[in-house]
Structures are given as C-alpha cells and as structure tokens.
C-alpha cells in the first residue's frame, strides 16, 4: 500500500503538457520540483512513465506518488467488539483517523486493518477525535449489504456526548442545519430548532438540511452533563452543532466547544494551559456507543462500546 493521488483528465484539460498541467494545478511545488518528480517516476500517466512534454488526453489517469512524510503519532489501540467471516465491529479509540487524508496515511484505521485483512470496507465513519463503534465489512457482498442499510437509514446509531451545563433541553431536536454565519470557522454549522420542520420541506435550499436527534440526559454533575443522542438523520456535525446551538457546547470540542477561536489555536499549537483547562478533555466528548443492525444472516444485532476512561461522567 502506497500513498498516491489519482486524477482523471477532463476534456478541458486535454492538450496540455503534463508538466505545465500539474505545476499549474498543484502549486505547492514549483515547476522544477514537478519536473524532477516526473523524471523520477513519481508522476505517471496510465501507470506508465512519461516525459515532461507528454501531451495529456481526455480520460488519461495521472498518478502522483508523494515523498514519504513523518506522520503524527496516533492511538492505534482499537478493541474488537465482534467478528465473523463477514463483519468486524470495533471500538475505535480517540485520536485515530479512519481514512487516509492530509498528513495521515499509515496512521489510519484503514491502513492498520488492510495489513491484517485481505478485504475491508469501512461502513461508517467517525472523526479522528470521536471514539466508539465502527462497522467494517470483510467481503464485497457484505459491504454492499451494509452500505445499503446505512443509506436506507436502517442502521440505528446512538451516541454519548459530554456537554457543559445541566442539560434541560428538548427530548427531540428537530429543525435545520445551516452554515454558521457568526463563526470564523467556515465549516462550522448552526442548528435552528423548528418543531414544524419536515424533511421534504426546504430541500431546495442547498445551505439548509433537515436534521432530527432524540436527546436524553443520562447523568450530570456541577459542571457537565452526559447526554444520549439517537440520530434519526445523518448529517455532518449534526450532534455537535445541535447541542451547541441549544446552549450545551461539547466538552473538548475545538469547534463546537466553549470558544471556536480555540480551533485555530489548536491547529497552530498555541492553546494555553488555561484554555486546555477550559476544554477539559484532549479530544472532543463524543462517543458512538450503540449500533443496531440486521446482520447478513438476518439476525438483528446490537453492539455497544464503553466510553473513554477520561470522561468525568
């Protein structure tokens, strides 16, 4: 397994020399560096070595093999919850990316499992900082079966979330997820509670997504609450955005926590000890603790995973 990037040449890109095309598209290297990569065979077209003056054609497949990089350490200590010939269920630890991306390749769950199993397909996805139940298909047949269940919303998923404050919010949060116009973080979302919301309504607005989450307080102390969240829809950042907009920021969350300015400080390794104390947890307090599905054999099965040890509740 080798880190690589593949690009299919579109009609509008055809007719260009490969060196000119790649140095204009990916400006993080200059033309001289890209030229050296082509000569060294780190850039191939249709799996073959080419010269820098090779003229690209529509549907050519350009493959780029980056130089090896030192990846940040991660937590690889996942626990097996269940396994048979078709399905693997694990409790993913915090601080472990699921799929290759950015600076992570070998230090990902996908890579770790690919070294052990002939075939794997990750059915669901969790953020690097989120722990809990992950479903992995071990055959192509089971991958198609479980993906279809996931797409049809037939797999039930419940999360445990640690939030600031004494949770007294609604038992059902139904409404709309939209971009958070008040945030400095472009990918942050806001939730607008709307008891009259229904999924077909508003689907014409690309910035507005229907979302519904069932909420239940499990426990609390003087500072935090432990909340169970059952997803009735599967939207990006659904739980974190919903709870934050309801007034209960997620503990340890650099985006949906007490202060979203922490996000950029975290990226630049500039968080102070006081700000880390404010966050309380190193990773966001979100854990996929229960998943129910119909197995390929027709049996309904429920899998659970213990939450992280560093949570106070």
Image: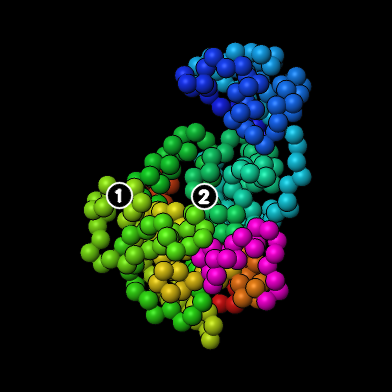
> Looking at the image, which is closer to me, 224 or 117?
224
Q: Which quarter of the picture shows residue 33?
A: top right
The answer to whether 219 is drawn above or below residue 198 in the figure is below
Q: Position of residue 40 (x, y in %)?
A: 77, 22
- Asked whether the beta carbons under mark 1 and mark 2 sit within 8 Å of each other, the answer is no
Residue 110 visible to an observer of this rendering: no
Q: Is residue 272 magenta?
A: yes
Q: Which residue is mark 1?
A: 205
Q: Position of residue 203 (x, y in %)?
A: 28, 49
Q: Residues within 10 Å of mark 1 (few under 14, many from 20)?
A: few
Residue located at (44% from left, 36% from top): 144
> Looking at the image, which is closer to me, 148 or 259?
259
Residue located at (73% from left, 53% from top): 73
- Compute the Cα span from label 1 to label 2: 26 Å
Disc 2 on helix, strand or loop? Answer: loop
Q: Which quarter of the picture shows residue 46?
A: top right
The answer to whether 58 is drawn above or below residue 154 in the figure is above
User: How many numbered tags mark residues here?
Assistant: 2
- In the image, is 70 to the left or to the right of 9? right
SS assignment for the magenta stretch, majority: loop
Q: Which mark is residue 157?
A: none
Q: Is residue 36 magenta?
A: no
Quarter holding the N terminus is top right
Residue located at (45% from left, 69% from top): 244
The answer to whether 163 is drawn above or below residue 91 in the figure is below
Q: Earlier in the sequence, mark 1 or mark 2?
A: 2
Q: Which residues are magenta?
A: 253-274
Disc 1 on helix, strand or loop? Answer: loop
Residue located at (38% from left, 63% from top): 191
Q: Viewer-nearest of labels 1 and 2?
A: 1
Q: Which residue is mark 2?
A: 125
- In the image, is 181 to the left or to the right of 60? left
């Amino acid at each position: 397994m080798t880190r690589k990037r593949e690009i299919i040449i579109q009609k509008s890109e055809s007719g260009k020399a490969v060196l000119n095309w790649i140095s204009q598209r990916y400006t993080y290297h200059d033309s001289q560096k890209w030229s050296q990569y082509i000569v060294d065979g780190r850039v191939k077209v249709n799996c073959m070595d080419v010269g820098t003056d090779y003229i690209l054609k529509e549907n050519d497949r350009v493959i780029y093999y980056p130089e090896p990089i030192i990846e940040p350490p991660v937590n690889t200590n996942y626990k097996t919850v269940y396994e048979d010939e078709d399905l693997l269920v694990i409790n993913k630890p915090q601080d472990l990316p699921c799929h290759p991306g950015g600076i992570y390749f070998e230090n990902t769950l996908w890579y770790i499992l690919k070294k052990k199993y002939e075939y794997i397909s990750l059915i669901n996805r969790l953020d690097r900082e989120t722990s809990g139940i992950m479903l992995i298909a071990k055959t192509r047949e089971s991958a198609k079966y479980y993906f279809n269940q996931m797409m049809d919303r037939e797999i039930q998923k419940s999360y445990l979330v640690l939030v600031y404050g004494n949770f007294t919010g609604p038992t059902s949060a139904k409404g709309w997820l939209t971009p958070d116009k008040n945030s400095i973080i472009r990918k942050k979302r806001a939730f607008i509670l709307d008891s009259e919301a229904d999924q077909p309504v508003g689907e014409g607005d690309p910035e507005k997504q229907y979302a519904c989450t069932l909420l239940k307080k499990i426990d609390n102390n003087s500072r935090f609450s432990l909340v169970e969240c059952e997803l009735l829809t599967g939207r990006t950042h659904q739980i974190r955005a919903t709870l934050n907009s309801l007034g209960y920021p997620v503990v340890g969350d650099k985006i949906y926590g007490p202060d979203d300015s922490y996000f950029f400080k975290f990226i630049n390794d500039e968080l102070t000890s006081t700000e880390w104390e404010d966050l309380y947890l190193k990773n966001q307090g979100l854990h996929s603790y229960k998943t129910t599905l119909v197995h390929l054999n027709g049996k309904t099965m429920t899998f659970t995973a213990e939450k992280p040890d560093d949570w106070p509740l």
